[in-house]
Image (tube, rainbow, N blue to C red):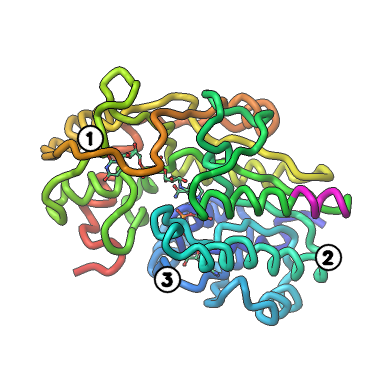
Amino acid sequence: MNERDSQILVTGGAGYIGSHTVLALLEADYDVVVIDSLVNASFESLRRVERITGKSLTFIEGDIRDRALLDNIFATHDISAVLHFAGLKAVGESVKLPLSYYESNLAGTVTLCQAMQSAAVFRLVFSSSATIYGPDAPVPYHEQLPRGWPSSPYGMSKAMVERVLDDVCLADERWAVALLRYFNPIGAHESGLIGEDPRGIPNNLLPFIAQVAVGRRERLSIFGSDYPTKDGTCKRDYLHVMDLAEGHVKALERLEYSGCRAYNLGTGQAVSVLEMVDTFQTVSGKTIPYDVVPRREGDLAAFWADPTLAYEALGWQAQRNLNDMIRDTWRWQEANPNGYSGG
Ligand code: NAD
Ligand code: WQD
């Protein structure tokens, strides 16, 4: 059977990366079923995805830890593969609430895999993170490096899920799993209709800068300017969320092997916090006032991807540059100053 005659289950599909990936899947003619508890998202994102694509999807509000619900979804839909985004993602919060993070991210994934196994669905794409390389890995990070010991419960939950999925694949050769290790996704769909809509004070750099630019916050705090980098601020490998979304479609299309394979999804270029602020000012025409404050605990000076494997094995390479990322973030933020809640 052609995969496009069956359905793709997307967990966490109403969230930031999930909604952009659902859009890419619909545009590639996949039939999509989303399960999302809406703990960190709004259904409005998916309503807008339907508007942009002119296509409809099936939405189920629910939790991946609810085994009965998952069994019902697999029983009532013809699912051929799962893209698994659902989980909690705030690094600082995970230090305070480790059990919530291990329950959602680790136990939730185990429940999902159990439901998949009993429904004989063995194809899975998992949202992993560069954080699994741990604080001591040499840069650039490449997939042959061993997993490290991430310092936060969030990071550790990702490393643990990767290990669980390794073991699941070793035990049963019917499984085909892609571990997609994202670097720092930013940006928004070029329509400006969907984008990142963090609740409360943004933890991540770009959403914070965008909220300063739109007048929701007064000043950016730059966490440290005494790192061993050229300008003293930390460097990261930022990639456009639509490039990331397209990487998922490619990973899904190549999911014909047996076993568990990891791929870095990044650009291979690192940008410092000050470079980001400068470029944002140039692209948006807005001034971003900032203060340099002490380092944030747990931050690494600089890391970036070696994305060669994703290119060779998936035919994926980031297409959009930093200006594109910032232009699309700004278009989304300017048109939706309060995110999906409007007002
Ligand atoms: P997000 O919070 O916007 O999306 C996660 C979605 O999952 C949300 O819609 C939320 O409501 C839903 N969800 C959470 N727990 C759930 C549960 N138990 N059952 C059902 N739905 C649940 O986050 P995002 O930035 O889109 O990230 C998606 C995935 O990618 C996450 O697993 C995250 O850890 C991973 N990731 C994100 C980044 C990043 O920088 N954004 C980097 C690396 C990896
Ligand atoms: C980027 C740089 C900050 C905010 C986190 C997670 C990681 C991954 C992506 C999921 C850093 C600096 C930030 C601010 C600042 N998520 N900064 N002022 O820390 O690389 O990664 O999100 O897997 O696991 O740890 O991204 O956007 O938080 O920070 O100066 O208000 O910007 O110090 O150098 P990070 P970030």
The front one of 218 and 313 is 218
Residue 17, percent from left and from top? 47, 52
Amino acid type of disc 1? Phe
Magenta residues? 166-171
Residues under labels 2 and 1: Cα distance? 47 Å
Amino acid type at mark 2: Ala
Which residue carries the number 2 mark?
Answer: 120
Residue hosting label 3 = 43
For label 2, count other residues whose C-alpha is less than 10 Å away and answer few (under 14), some (14-19) or many (20+). some
In the displayed structure, would residue 148 be above or below residue 305?
Answer: below
Q: What residue type is labelled 3?
A: Phe
Question: Residue tagged by mark 1?
Answer: 280
Q: Which of 133 and 210 is in front in this view?
A: 133
Give the Cα distance between marks 1 and 3.
29 Å
Q: Earlier in the sequence, mark 2 or mark 1?
A: 2
**Which residue is found at the position 44% from the left and 44% from the top?**
241
Q: Residue at x 44, y 36 (%)?
A: 239
Element assignment for label 1: helix
> Of discs 2 and 3, which sits in the foreground?
2
